[in-house]
Image (cartoon, rainbow, N blue to C red):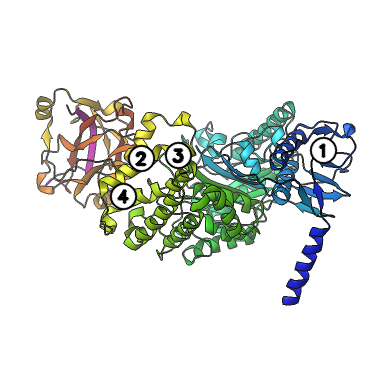
Amino acid sequence: MKKISVFLSVMLFFNCLLAFEIDKSYQIAVSDKQEVQDIYAAQELAKYLSQVTGNNFAVVKESEISAGNTIYVGNTKFSKGGNFAPDEFRIYTNGKNVVIAGSPQRGVLFGVYEFLERFADVRFFTPECERVPSKKSLNVPDKTDIRHKSAFEFRYIYAGKRTHNTTPFFRKMRLSGWDGEMKYGSSARFGTDGHCHTYFKYSKDFPQEISWADASGNRRIVKTPLGGSICFSHPEVLKRFVERLKKNIASDRANAAKQNLPPPQYYSVSQNDCDSACGCAECKKFIEKYGVSGLVIDFTNRLTEAVVKDYPDVKIQIFAYFDSINPPKTAIRPHKNVIVQVASYQTKFHDHLRSVNDPVNKQYADLLNNWKKSADSLGLWDYWRYFSGFKPSAPIALNLADNINAYKNSNVVMFFTEFETAPKDLLSFYDLTFYVGSRLLDDPSKNVQTMVDEFAETYYGAAAPAMKKLLVLLTEAVKKDKNCAEYLNFAQRTYMKDAEFFRQAFALIDEAEKSVANDKNLLTRVWQEKLLIESAYLKAWNSHKNKLKLDRKKLQESISKMLYPVLRSFFDPSILSKKVVADADRFYAEKVVFEKTQNVKAVPIADFAQKHPQAEIIEFSKLPCGNQKVNDADSPYGRAFSHSAKYSEKQRAERHKRQFVFGLYEKSYTKYLVHGTIKPNDIPQDEKYHWYYAGTTRLYKSLSLWLHWTWGMSISLNKFYDENKPDKKYNVYFLIKIQGPAYVKNSTSLNDVRLCAIALVEQK
């Protein structure tokens, strides 16, 4: 083993001796055809080489090359072309000339960035943070010949409101989607109807006789992409899908030709954001034999076969999602032009921020392995974040190599991940994760520790050692729960209860902060993590019992001080209005306080009107509630929303065994008003409508009033929020009737709770 190592070292040494220099004598040439993507790639090369060496590099047509050596960019005569996959490139030397060739669809541009990274030591970390060293010249080994194609044919990271979300930066990260002019090599993109939940778009105008059938076999017109599917067995459904898809493809190709762009290659024909199964007799029979995923695949295969006769290069994407998450029961396989995109978010067996090799994720690893056996081409809809209201410090960066290599080995060709961030959605080590993840998606063999070291050295400066230790501390802390903790309230996760974890985290943050105290930019990047850890400590106060004896007010003041610089480092100022920042401050500094209610008693309608003549009553017809409407003579409005009308008598009995509770819940802050209770002895026995006090609160943007222990009746109060008066407080009341033998002695009515109004009483 030692002999081999010595031999390699000697070979590397001689290769370096055989290198030649690229200096100011070089020029950069593009084809006389002046392809827009080649020109942009050449300009990028010239820009960065000039920054590195301090010399100017001219970009010329191939026919105008003067004496000297040349870097040829794109499809030049000198490069003699070549066949390349959309993201593929080749970098090679010919004498002392260098050729960067590749596909016009991003390949040439990717080759330029690879050349800059390999031979000029340039690094692209974020849109605002790059490493561009100073060198007199570049050494390129003689007989260099590098050919590379990205590991996944489609790669996209959804960044939300982060200023990452630009095509030029995406190309530096070797991401292939989403939008893009031809100068950026266009993009790997989806055609008309988008990339997800398209059944609704295909079927929204279907007549009832061919529409989806519910579990009882009743055909229903699906009104939203959240509440139904399609019928996979009715021949008219397939016919209409084929017609629409062919029309979309033809239209997209005509538009692409007008814009001188390659046409979209991918088309999503995918289930709505809910279960996919159809309850008609034919579909049920098919499901019994093949499973729901088999039903979806069979339909898609027939659709694909009808379309690829005319468009053989089109690829159709479907989901393995909700009830179609598992592979077919028997050997039914997707057509070679079908990509099955696995989306596991609704499952309870996948902790997305932990390694796929973690024991917690064994069921997920088995799922991927089973799909690998069932399909030639898979897609993955991944998640590099949690979706709780508050995102605790929980980075995924150090687990990405395990995950991405597992995906590559599972026939995954299409990768999409949700990594969106927003002012109240800050994520731990966001920029590092984006960088490491992007580069691994292009080349899973890259060394993560090397990338982390390079990133931290530039991004954190002198704070790098402490911040790297913090990254490891947080990554290991997430593993402390032996079961999947993704769906726990963050404050209940093991490390959020651990005072020693917080002690170590604060010590590392303090060390990092002191080391860059005189550099505003570096300090702000340290604050990105400090803010989340201090906020987590505040929000988990009842879990760790403040064992570190920290001052709550000082923590709040610290968070408020850091907040705007941190937000400004992530987001464009145009979205950071005073209201947005103030709202984020209330969120992170834990300044949202609800007044607590306990037991409440009924107030007759007449008494309420007399006591609160100025109350704003939101009556039945204006009430945002999704429950079933019923006629009710006792309601002041003649109608009401019923909690139980849609349930059987047996189901009603089960739902009304417990004590009646209610509350106010603010989704974006994940804040509960302590549950109010109506005790059995306090329930009026007249089965009439009465008012009840819910609590006193501001009307936050995501505030809901929920009734019943099932939350079976929920009313969103956001439409009454006045952003010009964000601190106005209201006493909230609701007008309900409680009926049936579960609540009223000797009642012959059906067990139910009915709502017909709410009231807002402004506090003066």
- Name the amino acid type tagged 3: Ala
Q: Residues within 10 Å of mark 4 (few under 14, many from 20)?
A: many
Circle 4/circle 2 CB separation < 8 Å: no
SS label for mark 2? helix
Q: What's the CA distance linking mark 1 and mark 2?
A: 50 Å
Q: Position of residue 719 (x, y in %)?
A: 33, 29
The residue to which callout 1 is attached is 27
The residue to which callout 4 is attached is 539
SS label for mark 1? strand
Q: Residues within 10 Å of mark 2 (few under 14, many from 20)?
A: some
Q: Residues within 10 Å of mark 1 (few under 14, many from 20)?
A: many
In this rendering, position of residue 664 left or right of residue 244: left
Q: Is residue 174 above or below residue 264?
A: below
The residue to which callout 3 is attached is 422
- Name the amino acid type tagged 1: Gln
- Name the amino acid type tagged 4: Lys
Q: Earlier in the sequence, mark 4 or mark 1?
A: 1
Circle 3/circle 4 CB separation < 8 Å: no
State yes or no: residue 758 in magenta.
yes
